[in-house]
Image: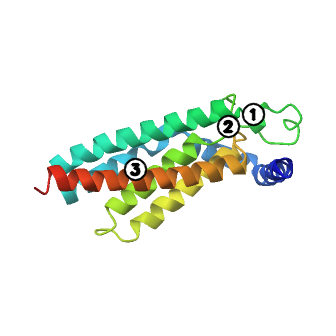
Amino acid sequence: MIEKLLERDTELFLFLNNLGSQPWDNLWLIITNKLTFIPLYAILLFLLYKKYGLKSLLIFVVVVALMITFTDQITNVFKRGFQRSRPCGEDNLIDQMRFIAVRCGKYGFFSGHSSNSMAAAVFAGLILKQYYKYLIFILLFWSLVVAYSRIYVGVHYPLDIVCGLVFGAISGFLFYKLAKYLLKRFVSS
């Protein structure tokens, strides 16, 4: 059963990856770059400051730093534990796919980009929901685009992406709960 699932995952990867075309490659390389969205993060921090104040912002910054560290480290534990090669590292796939990423990396299960972007989207979307009720949908869409970029550039299978997104959503929710607790404990009192 697992073999069949992995086979279907590879087929879906090849289909999605080969939807790309050279005129769009630079856009997707920009989207997949971790530094591209620093302005988005700065805007979210500004919104948090504007709606919650400086003391709360400091709590949010600490919680987000812990959340990203957590998702990164757990992602690495899974990558080392499962040791599933990335598609760009598979000799039998390289001639069938489009590999445009800067580097390949060794293991890919599950995607750190997907888990981090989804965690940030869920966390910020929930924290700011009472002020900007549609923001969470914009952030979730952004996270899905970032996740797809990893397939487009040839470094992750769809299953890597889906598991990263699920893990990120759970992490974002848990750290949202932690932030709400810390706000109640240290700011509201």
The mark tally for this picture is 3
Query: Is any part of residue 25 visible from this angle?
Result: yes
Q: Quadrant of residue 93?
A: top right
Q: CA distance from mark 1 to mark 3?
A: 31 Å
Residue 168, given in percent of the width and then of the height, sits at: 51, 50
- 44 with respect to 77 (left or right): left
Q: Nearer the viewer, residue 143 or 42?
A: 143
Q: Give the residue at mark 3.
A: 40
The span from disc 2 to disc 1 (Cα, nearest Å) is: 6 Å
Mark 1 and mark 3 lie on one chain; the one further toward the N terminus is 3
- Mark 3 residue element: helix
Residue on which disc 2 sits: 108
Foreground residue among 54 and 162? 162
Residue type at the position of mark 1: Ser
SS for callout 1: loop
Identified at 77% across, 38% down, the residue is 87
Q: Answer whether labels 2 and 1 touch (C-beta < 8 Å).
A: yes
Q: Which residue is mark 1?
A: 85
What distance separates the C-alpha of mark 2 from that of mark 3? 26 Å
Nearer the observer: mark 1 or 3; the answer is: 1
Tag 2 secondary structure: loop
Q: Amino acid at mark 3?
A: Leu
